[in-house]
Image (tube, rainbow, N blue to C red):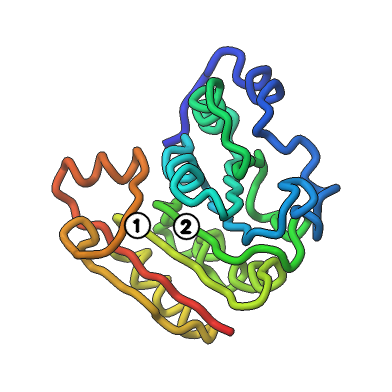
Amino acid sequence: MRLKNVKGAKEKIEASNYIIKTPEIYKGKYQTLFNNTNPIHLEIGMGKGEFIIKMAKKYPNINFIGMEMFDSVIVRATEKLENEEISNLKLIKMDATNIENVFSHEISCIYLNFSDPWPKKRHAKRRLTSEIFLNKYDNIFKGKKRIIQKTDNRHLFEYSLISFVNHNYKIDKISLDLTNDDLENVTSEYEEKFIKLGLPIYMVEVYKD
């Protein structure tokens, strides 16, 4: 998924009005950035931004923030947004490991779309549904905690289900073949590639009070 050598990527990112350049200063007060009290939804690992852009357009009464660590990927989202005016969307370029440095009890929902599965056992702690990350999310959620995960990787999906349950989450919705299930779904570019290949998409929506 990571792209290489995107010419002028850093400059394009810096020039984008959608990029939050110093997210630390908004910790605990992102409502002032959006200038409203609407719920804030966060996508971690937003890639090229297809999903988060679609969601922001579809749900104008929700504020959306997309997080991505690679210049060469997030620049594609800023390019898509060059001629757009979407007031309920912002982007952050950073590693999710540091998520507690920029948010504090203000996120209503987290999206984890096709995250890196980190298949080797010794890398399990890097998975975005590991206990380490679920503990971090506890500190950024506001009120009821909700996570929606989609993946093409069955092993990551199985690992995540166990991890969620062990962290006291309850399953609200689940699908072993999202493309062919009668569930509302906004797709990403990455997801559409798997759909064309006829591969199953796994989805789970979990929550805890």
Residue that mark 2 sits on = 112
Q: Position of residue 206 (x, y in %)?
A: 45, 75
Q: Position of residue 175 (x, y in %)?
A: 26, 69
Q: Position of residue 134 (x, y in %)?
A: 59, 71
Residue 190, quarter of picture = top left
Q: Quadrant of the C terminus?
A: bottom right
Q: Calculate the distance from the C-alpha at mark 2 to the C-alpha at mark 1.
A: 8 Å
Q: Are marks 2 and 1 in contact (CB under 8 Å)?
A: yes
- The disc label shown at residue 60, or none: none
Q: Amino acid at mark 1?
A: Thr
Q: Earlier in the sequence, mark 2 or mark 1?
A: 2
Disc 2 is placed on an element classified as strand
Residue at (39% x, 52% y) in the render? 114
* Vertical order, 85 against 5 (above or below): below
* Vertical order, 133 against 168 (above or below): above
Q: Amino acid at mark 2?
A: Leu
Residue at (63% x, 53% y) in the render? 96
* 29 or 11: nearer the viewer: 29
* 96 or 119: nearer the viewer: 96
Q: Quadrant of the N terminus?
A: top left
Residue 126, quarter of picture = bottom right
Residue at (58% x, 57% y) in the render? 41
Extreme residue toward the right, this view? 25
Number of other residues with Cα within 10 Å of mark 1, as a class: few under 14, some 14 to 19, many 20 or more: many
* Vertical order, 106 against 158 (above or below): above
Residue at (76% x, 35% y) in the render? 21
User: How many numbered marks are there?
Assistant: 2
Horizontal arrangement in the rendering, residue 191 relative to residue 96 (left or right):
left
Residue 137, quarter of picture = bottom right
Disc 1 is placed on an element classified as strand
- The disc label shown at residue 151, or none: 1
Q: Position of residue 171 (x, y in %)?
A: 40, 80
